[in-house]
Image (tube, grey):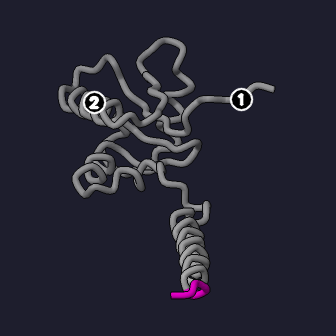
Amino acid sequence: MTTDTTPPLRVYIASITGNTEVRKHIQRTLMILDGLGVPFKAIDITVRGNEEEKEYMREHSKKEGAGILPPQFFHNNDYLGNFSDFDEAVETNTLEEFLRLIPTDIPDATSSQAADESKSRETSVEGESSKVSGQNF
């Protein structure tokens, strides 16, 4: 049985571009993701053989405007946004939510763990108090 270790986050980039603004956006994106250790797959739409990926990016990017330029962000097959959305998430400290790095369908483990620890402490304290009260002074 083989497991697919491809990260769910896909970032569509262009290694060859004459647009300096796009180049800076891609560099900033890669620097931030690499710096934070975020697992992602970079898909270079300018590489020969990635024509289907380039077409996928264009068809599934939902932003209206002048054109669909890299970088574009997808989580599995869900479109997340473009560089403006990414940059806003960085500036507002909501990058984990934007990139869907925080699972939303898993119960909050920290609250149940805290409740278990609290219950464990209560049991421990009750046991100690009964030992103390059972002693003769």
Depth order, front residue of 87/44: 87
The circle on residue 3 is: 1
Magenta part of the chain: 133-137
Element type at mark 2: helix
Query: Residue placed at 54% from the left, 77% from the top?
Result: 125
Judge left or right: residue 59 versus residue 130.
left
Query: Residue placed at 59% from the left, 71% from the top?
Result: 120
Residue type beneath disc 1: Thr
Quadrant including the N terminus = top right
Q: Main secondary structure of the magenta part?
A: loop
Quarter where residue 15 is shown: top left
Q: Which residue is mark 2?
A: 31
Depth order, front residue of 99/105: 105
Quarter where residue 47 is shown: top left
User: How many neighbours does mark 1 have within 10 angstroms: few (below 14), some (14-19), or many (20 or more)?
Assistant: few
Query: Residue placed at 43% from the left, 22% from the top?
Result: 44
Q: Position of residue 106 (x, y in %)?
A: 61, 60
Question: Do tag 1 and tag 2 residues touch (Cβ < 8 Å)?
Answer: no
Query: What is the CA distance from the residue labelled 1 to the residue labelled 2?
Result: 28 Å
Q: Position of residue 66 (x, y in %)?
A: 30, 44
Task: Residue lying at the far front in this picture: please name it.
Answer: 137
Q: Is residue 21 magenta?
A: no
Task: Residue lying at the far top in this picture: please name it.
Answer: 48
| In this view, the mark in front (1 or 2) | 1
The circle on residue 127 is: none
